Image: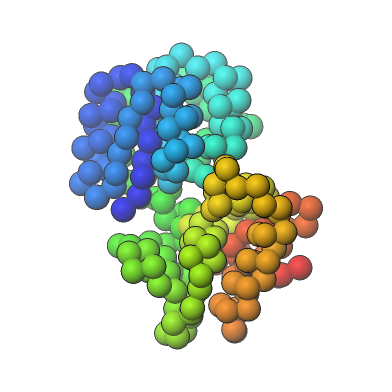
């Protein structure tokens, strides 16, 4: 079950997306205005944001919206567009995928499912699997090679977030905001300490988290090789 935010004032688009996502048990919230949608993204932490280009966004306005860390560091982005709007989602615009209006419910389910798969590295029900590492999202448990790993709550939340966004690098500040919250005033070394503890507990036979020089950290995508630095 994932949170999906739909930013659209088109009732038909909202109804189709909502019906498609609820068939798979996802939680859906809708917002007709971009500004309020971004505020909702901060408070609700959706896994995917669906943006309707019928809102009248220009190419520059859409790019600026998607550069907002509330979207960029947290969610996959799908755009609903019409053929005459293809120019808005060209190279350089950080949209993960597009859905062509009028929407088809089965296509919506397919594209959402593929995007969630690409971001989580594979989800079976409420379980994230990365090699020998299994994160049970319902039971809040982590196992490596069938052995239970004892993590603190913050260690678990940090690992879960990184594993749900495999291959995507995050700055220490972005991780602080996402896991500890915007009201947390601790330093970035907090992230380093937690990463070191997580690595010591889960990386028994293979690395899962890598340091991205001059950036921060990312969970190693199963489709590519990576080395801890």
In the rendered image, residue 106, in percent from the top left (x then y), is placed at 25, 41
Foreground of the two, 200 or 102: 200
Indicate whether 180 appears above or below 135. above
Q: Residue at x 71, y 70 (%)?
A: 228
From this viewpoint, which residue is outermost toward the top?
A: 56
Give the quarter of the image for residue 22. top left
Indicate whether 49 appears above or below 216. above
* Residue 104 seen in the current view: no
Q: Residue at x 54, y 16 (%)?
A: 58
* Residue 143 seen in the current view: yes
**Is 198 on the left or on the right of 40, as rendered?**
right
Q: Residue at x 61, y 51 (%)?
A: 176
Q: Quarter of the image containing the C terminus?
A: bottom right
**Is 15 on the left or on the right of 161, as rendered?**
left
Foreground of the two, 194 or 123: 194
Give the quarter of the image for residue 189. bottom right
In the rendered image, residue 138, in percent from the top left (x then y), is placed at 32, 64
In the rendered image, residue 32, in percent from the top left (x then y), is placed at 36, 21
């Amino acid at each position: 079950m994932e949170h999906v935010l739909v930013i659209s004032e088109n009732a038909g688009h909202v109804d189709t997306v909502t019906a498609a996502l609820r068939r798979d048990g996802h939680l859906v919230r809708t917002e007709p205005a971009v500004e309020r949608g971004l505020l909702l993204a901060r408070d609700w932490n959706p896994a995917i944001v669906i943006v309707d280009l019928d809102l009248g966004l220009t190419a520059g306005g859409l790019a600026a919206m998607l550069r907002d860390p509330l979207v960029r560091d947290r969610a996959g982005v799908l755009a609903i567009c019409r053929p005459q709007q293809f120019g808005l989602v060209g190279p350089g615009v950080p949209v993960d995928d597009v859905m062509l209006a009028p929407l088809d419910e089965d296509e919506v389910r397919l594209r959402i499912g593929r995007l969630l798969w690409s971001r989580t590295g594979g989800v079976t029900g409420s379980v994230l699997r990365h090699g020998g590492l299994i994160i049970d999202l319902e039971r809040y448990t982590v196992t490596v090679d069938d052995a239970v790993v004892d993590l603190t709550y913050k260690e678990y939340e940090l690992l879960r977030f990184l594993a749900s966004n495999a291959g995507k690098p995050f700055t220490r500040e972005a991780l602080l905001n996402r896991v500890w919250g915007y009201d947390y005033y601790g330093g970035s070394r907090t992230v380093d300490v937690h990463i070191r503890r997580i690595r010591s507990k889960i990386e028994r036979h293979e690395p899962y988290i890598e340091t991205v020089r001059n950036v921060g950290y990312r969970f190693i995508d199963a489709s590519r090789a990576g080395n801890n630095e």
